[in-house]
Image (spheres, rainbow, N blue to C red):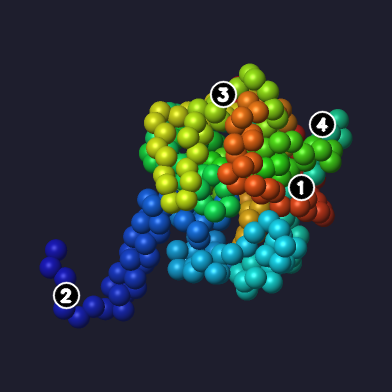
Amino acid sequence: MASSPVASPRTLRMTTQAAAAAAVLLVAACGGTEDSTADAPATVDTPGLKEPEAESPEESSWSYEGETGPANWAELEADYATCAAGERQSPVDLPAPADAAQGEAAVVTYDYQPAAYEVVDTGHTIQADAGSSAGGITVAGEDYELLQFHAHAPSEHAFAGERTDLEVHLVHQNAAGELAVVGVLVEEGESSSALAEAWADLPTGEQTVSVADFDAGTLLPEDRTTYQYEGSLTTPPCTEGVQWLVMQETATAPAEVITGFEEAVGESARPLQPLNEREPVLGQPAG
Ligand SMILES: [Zn+2]
């Protein structure tokens, strides 16, 4: 295990990569920071999302209103150009089921398991980072592991122009670093307490709230038919190549959960983006 006193370029390169990986892990282990983007896990390595851990607070000062709001995201950072130039952006308005495209949908299976989560306030959302294996989904035979879930108010996606109170995003990543996000639109109601359980205590400031034995599957509605389309992160840098799976059926959460989130986070929904050439298809769950 003795290391050579003279490091070859290859060794140096590997050392640098190892250091970068350690830095990423450290950021991930620390949970959300000012630098975190809601849809982008710290571990994802995508073009336009280089070294997120090195960003200074000023560089991530995007917001949902005014001069740093969605209309100006692309001007805030060179890496955010896709927010304006991209043609496969999210969120989008989804058609009524009868009007949905009849294309071929991917088969999706859901296999979540109870896990520990660290809930943090990223400055843009309340985010629950999986601290142990929380399971995941399989899309067309490809496995994606659940990294975190967070929410937006009101919902980001719309059904035939109508938004709901909240939208939960479950962010998954495959071995190649590609993302698949499951979106669940939430309306006020009494029948589900999954969000109430996950957010019994909302963190404030730098605080982290630990949640044990939470099953992310309880966030999903009973009918797991999804609208499927290829889109982007809904937060800067708006990176494309994200597989979106938006549940056709809405979930419910008690009024206090919705108002609690709204008070903690405020309005946090990006405006609807043009579909352009895309046609979301409706996919039935497997089995
Ligand atoms: Zn999101």
Residue 106 visible, this orientation: no
- Calculate the distance from the C-alpha at mark 2 to the C-alpha at mark 1: 55 Å
Q: Is residue 117 visible?
A: yes
Q: Secondary structure at mark 2?
A: loop
| Camera-side mark, 4 or 3 | 3
- N-terminal label among 1 and 4: 1
SS for callout 3: loop
Label 4: which secondary element: helix
Between marks 3 and 2 in the image, the one whose residue lies nearer the viewer:
3
Residue drawn at 71 percent across, 36 percent down: 165
Residue underneath mark 1:
92
Q: How much space separates mark 4 and mark 3, taking CA atoms?
A: 27 Å
> Which is more N-terminal, label 4 or label 2?
2
Residues at marks 1 and 3 touching, judged by CB atoms closer than 8 Å: no
Q: Which three-letter amino acid code belongs to the residue tagged 2?
A: Ser
Position above or below: 217 against 236 = above
Is the residue at mark 4 in contact range of ligand 1, meaning its CB lies under 8 Å from it? Answer: no
**Residue type highlighted by circle 1:** Val
Disc nearest the viewer among 1 and 4: 1
Q: Amino acid at mark 3?
A: Ser
The residue at which mark 3 appears reads as 193
